[in-house]
Image (spheres, rainbow, N blue to C red):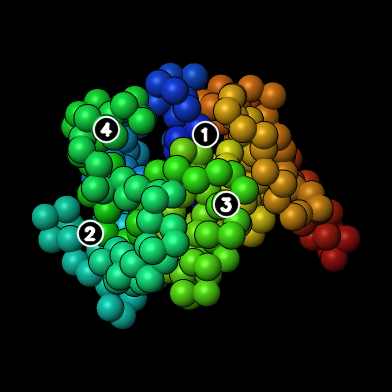
Amino acid sequence: MSMAVVYTDLDGTLLDHYTYAFDEALEAIKALRARGIPIVPCTSKTRAETVSLMQDLELDGPMIIENGAAIWVPDDWGLTRPEGADDDVNARAWSHCFGPPRGMIRRQLAILNIEWGNRYQSLCELSDKQVMAITGLDATSAARAKDRHHCETLVWLGTPADRPVFAEQVEALDLRCVQGGRFVHVLGRGGKGHAMSWLHHKIRAELPGFEMAVSIAAGDAENDVEMLEVADLALMVRSPVHDPPAPRRTGGMVISDNFGPAGWAEGIEALIARVEEEEDRGRLLSKRHDHDAA
């Protein structure tokens, strides 16, 4: 029986904001694996980027990609395919999308180009070298970052004050505009919180041993707020480049002292200890109830 599923942002959370390293989180990852607790990336990254990182992290489960616009699930996880799911035959997996494809989003955004076109650039229209310069990624990773199918990622060139106005106009097109650690992302009405809730409900309903598993979400940026609000427990990882956002929740959240993977390890260990404590308390209460009934 698994006590929890960890849903985690990658850049700036599990991965260092500058170097993308995760060495400081490795022991915590191994500890989760030993407890049978899955780690599900919930990221703005593309499928191509996330598959590569999961191999490096030795993870083999589902992933939530492109800011929650799509979910990718290996066949051997045993989750039933929803109606309309796409087959990934080569990878023996299926994917489920929550919004329109990137091409449709781009056509909608074209309506705003006259007013806003000089205040952003599409990441996918930049050269690999330009993406490398902005992100610090190598050439292969930069190409993977541009392989987007479910959301439009923008390099913001306007002022910070412009962005909320732009976001309002995007919302009027029945789309969403969210700020990540580096980029602005435009997607359908889904999001990380919606995708995480959908997947966690499915895991609890369909996987033996996960019926009582709690959801733990970890993130560092504005586009993580929704999943931090809807998870059973939440970890806000401090960032070296921006102040932590403020999820609307009254409890069940910790804020790390450290940045990036060190903060991730620190916070996840604290939250798992809390889950284990609650689980032990539940066992004691159950035993006491059985004794009283006898």
User: In x, y percent, where is residue 101?
Assistant: 29, 68
Q: Mark 3 near mark 1, Cβ–Cβ under 8 Å?
A: no
Q: Amino acid at mark 2?
A: Ala
Q: Residue at x 64, y 40 (%)?
A: 235
Question: Which residue in the structure is indicated by mark 2?
Answer: 93
Locate residue 275: give its quadrant: top right
> Quick one: label 2 or label 3, which is nearer the N terminus?
2
Tags 3 and 4 in contact by the CB under 8 Å rule? no
Label 3, label 4: how far apart the Cα atoms are: 24 Å
Q: Position of residue 278 (x, y in %)?
A: 74, 46
Please, what secondary structure does the residue beneath circle 1 have?
A: loop
Query: Which is more foreground, mark 2 or mark 4?
Result: 4
Q: Residue furthest left?
A: 90
Residue labelled with disc 1: 13
Q: Residues within 10 Å of mark 3 (few under 14, many from 20)?
A: few
Position of 287 with respect to 140 (left or right) is: right
- Badge 4 crowding class, 10 Å Cα cut-off, few under 14, some 14 to 19, many 20 or more, is few
Residue drawn 40% across the image and 26% down it:
20
Q: Which residue is mark 4?
A: 130
Whether residue 275 is visible here, answered yes or no, is no
Looking at the image, is mark 1 or mark 2 nearer the viewer?
Answer: 1
Q: Which residue is mark 3?
A: 162
Instruction: Using a 10 Å C-alpha cutoff, classify the residue at mark 1 as few (fewer than 14 neighbours), some (14 to 19) or many (20 or more).
Output: many
Q: Which mark is residue 88?
A: none
Q: How many marks?
A: 4
